Image (spheres, rainbow, N blue to C red):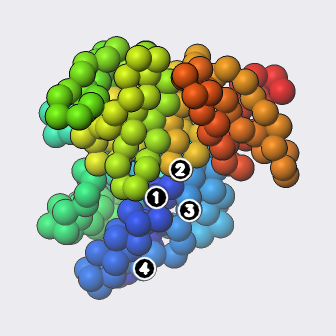
Amino acid sequence: MSTIRALIVDDEPLAREDLRYQLAELGDIEVVAQATNGPEGLEAVAEHRPDLVFLDVQMPGLTGFEVARRLAASDAPPHVVFVTAYDQHAIQAFEVNAVDYLLKPVDSARLEQAVQRVRKRIATPATPADLPLNDQLAQLVRAMAAKPDRREQVAVKVGETFTLVRADEIIYASLVDESITIVTGLVSGTSNDRTLDELQARLDPEIFWRVHRSHLVNINRIKEIVPWFSRNYILRMKDAKSTEIPVSRSQTRRLREYLKL
């Protein structure tokens, strides 16, 4: 069997390392590069020309959907396997002749199955009845974007009880000591989601931005934007403490463009 050249695109270092380790265990996959966000992923595809891209859905800079759109428009797009935090029910609605998808945390048996599907795609020449890969990716992207399974309410654990809050009332969510803290105007507590990716996947991406690997903010609940060193910014939020949240370098440009700074 020929070796499949793969690229991993994910903003979470532990997720990238876990996937790289599991791929190494399969023995016939060479990870030629890793990228931490969408723009870096596109650059890595152009530089390394991988056969296969493992593409996270929720990332800073460009989402996995946006990266897939751009790959689908290229002359020779690689095969794509989405890596997502969506639940099984939502994922079933997204299946539109895609190469495959993997749910986080990635199961080794499912990963091997996904790689075998990619290998069959590589080995089997396309027939006139087959959709071009560009169309397959475009269909998948449209389906996933059209049915995001977003929450209208989110459960926040305060003490021993759960309080339901409207999603648009969330001011920010932060990863603190391996726990996700959610803050609204009236409630501060924790989420049952394991990662910020899982929480973000259920929220409106037009409103909730991952401005930092540890922080997700409601852009409608920003009170002030404070210039910081190296042309970065600090966001002061509209909670009772006027909490300050840093903006990562990769998200600074997006913030400037959106707010015309």
User: How far apart, in angstroms, are the residues tagged by discs 1 and 2?
Assistant: 8 Å
Q: Which residue is mark 4?
A: 30
Residue 67 visible in the current orientation: no
Compared across the picture, whether 207 is left or right of 6 comes to right
Callout in the foreground (3, 1): 1
Crowding at dot 1, Cα within 10 Å, few <14 / some 14-19 / many 20+, comes out as some
Compared across the picture, whether 19 is left or right of 163 comes to right
User: How far apart, in angstroms, are the residues tagged by discs 3 and 4?
Assistant: 15 Å
Q: Does residue 31 sit above or below 152 in this rendering?
A: below
N-terminal-most mark, 1 or 4: 1
Q: In the image, which disc is placed on residue 12?
A: 1
**Secondary element type, mark 4:** strand
Q: Are marks 1 and 2 in contact (CB under 8 Å)?
A: yes
Q: Does residue 106 sit above or below 212 in this rendering?
A: below
Q: Which residue is mark 3?
A: 35
Which residue is found at the position 66% from the left and 43% from the top? 246
Q: Which residue is mark 2?
A: 213
The amino acid sitting under disc 2 is Arg
Which residue is found at the position 29% from the left and 24% from the top? 154
**Secondary element type, mark 2:** loop
